[in-house]
């Protein structure tokens, strides 16, 4: 199996959980943890490395961004946190400055890498990474709505007292307030969800998407950070890039005419490889979902305009 070199930029709560998740699940990897405060990246990588006796063919260490070269995957987790009850977009200015200091160096030293962005607002910041890197857009990916889809399936299962693993509910569009749940395609154990659960009415659906949008904030208001589910969903994306999984994932990259829209970074079901996004799967959706996707594209375009203003 090919050995992949993965750089994780940022060793805070998300970056550390990301490193641990990858170390547990992915064989034949080399992980470099990079952080402004090298003591933190050293401590986290040192701690995780002690799992090595039970997890062979893995390596983890800390490094400086300028020393990071020859990596196939770069994961961006560094960024400012939104204020309480704020929005992801409020941190664009600070995060553009962070990316401006990091992305050109990383792109220059790792010219064939796929950049996977977690930093919020994730769609707009993936666009920022694309602008700063000069890479083809298919090699700049936001983790997008893969996490949101996992969240809504979990919440729906709890509401209906059902098995979350049997649900298929996709969310497309923005990772943010205008995310679009595809109820028209939703299924349980392969059957249309409305046939299995007739009690799942519009009021329940609206409540579920509201709680999905708020999930990260609810965790923040409890004095914690949303780290485990995003790290798990991002690991699934990395596994697809590495060829360990052939399942489509819901990631965000540049829209090129899908649903008559071009330009913004939005999530759709996608197939990945070490070259980035290789195929975008266009789902059949309802007229309302199409309109909602168009609204989502406008919201992300506004965030991208903010990125342009600060670049």
Image (tube, rainbow, N blue to C red):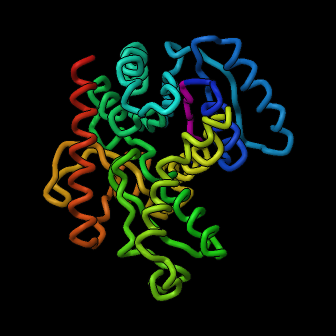
Say which residue appears at 69% left-offset and 30% top-offset.
60
Q: Residue furthest left?
A: 260
- The answer to whether 105 appears left or right of 131 in the picture is right
Q: Residue furthest front?
A: 203
| Image quadrant where one finds the C terminus | top left
**Residue 147 appears in the picture as rendered:** yes
* Magenta-colored span: 3-9
Q: Quadrant of residue 244?
A: bottom right
Viewer-proximal residue among 141 and 260: 260
Say which residue appears at 59% left-offset and 43% top-offset.
218
Say which residue appears at 66% left-offset and 75% top-offset.
161
Q: Is residue 147 magenta?
A: no
Viewer-proximal residue among 197 and 274: 197
Q: Is residue 4 magenta?
A: yes
Q: Quadrant of residue 116?
A: top left
Viewer-proximal residue among 290 and 251: 290
Residue 163 picture location, percent across and down: 65, 74
Residue 228 picture location, percent across and down: 65, 44
Say which residue appears at 54% left-offset and 46% top-offset.
234
Q: Main secondary structure of the magenta part?
A: strand
**Residue 72 appears in the picture as rendered:** no
Residue 45 picture location, percent across and down: 72, 26
Residue 289 picture location, percent across and down: 27, 65
């Amino acid at each position: 199996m090919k050995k992949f070199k993965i750089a994780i930029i940022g060793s805070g709560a998300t970056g550390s959980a990301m490193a641990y998740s990858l170390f547990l699940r992915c064989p034949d990897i080399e992980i470099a943890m990079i952080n402004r405060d090298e003591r933190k990246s050293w401590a986290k990588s040192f701690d995780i490395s002690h799992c090595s006796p039970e997890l062979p063919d893995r390596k983890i260490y800390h490094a400086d961004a300028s020393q990071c070269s020859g990596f196939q995957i770069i994961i961006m987790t560094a960024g400012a946190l939104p204020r309480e009850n704020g929005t992801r977009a409020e941190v664009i200015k600070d995060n553009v400055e962070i990316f401006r200091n990091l992305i050109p160096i990383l792109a220059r030293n790792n010219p064939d890498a796929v950049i996977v962005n977690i930093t919020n607002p994730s769609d707009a910041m993936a666009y920022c990474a694309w602008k700063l890197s000069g890479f083809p857009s298919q090699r700049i990916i936001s983790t997008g709505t893969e996490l949101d889809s996992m969240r809504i399936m979990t919440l729906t299962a709890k509401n209906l007292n059902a098995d979350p693993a049997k649900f298929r509910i996709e969310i497309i569009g923005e990772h943010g307030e205008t995310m679009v749940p595809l109820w028209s395609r939703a299924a349980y154990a392969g059957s249309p969800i409305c046939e299995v659960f007739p009690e799942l009415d519009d009021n329940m659906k609206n409540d579920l998407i509201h709680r999905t949008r708020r999930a990260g904030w609810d965790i923040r208001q409890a004095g914690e950070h949303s780290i485990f589910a995003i790290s798990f969903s991002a690991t699934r994306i990395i596994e697809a890039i590495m060829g360990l999984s052939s399942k489509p994932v819901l990631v965000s990259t540049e829209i090129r005419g899908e649903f008559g829209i071009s330009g913004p970074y939005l999530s759709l079901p996608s197939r990945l490889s070490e070259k980035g996004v290789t195929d975008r799967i266009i789902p059949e959706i309802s007229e309302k979902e199409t309109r909602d996707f168009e609204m989502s594209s406008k919201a992300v375009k506004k965030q991208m305009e903010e990125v342009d203003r600060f670049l």
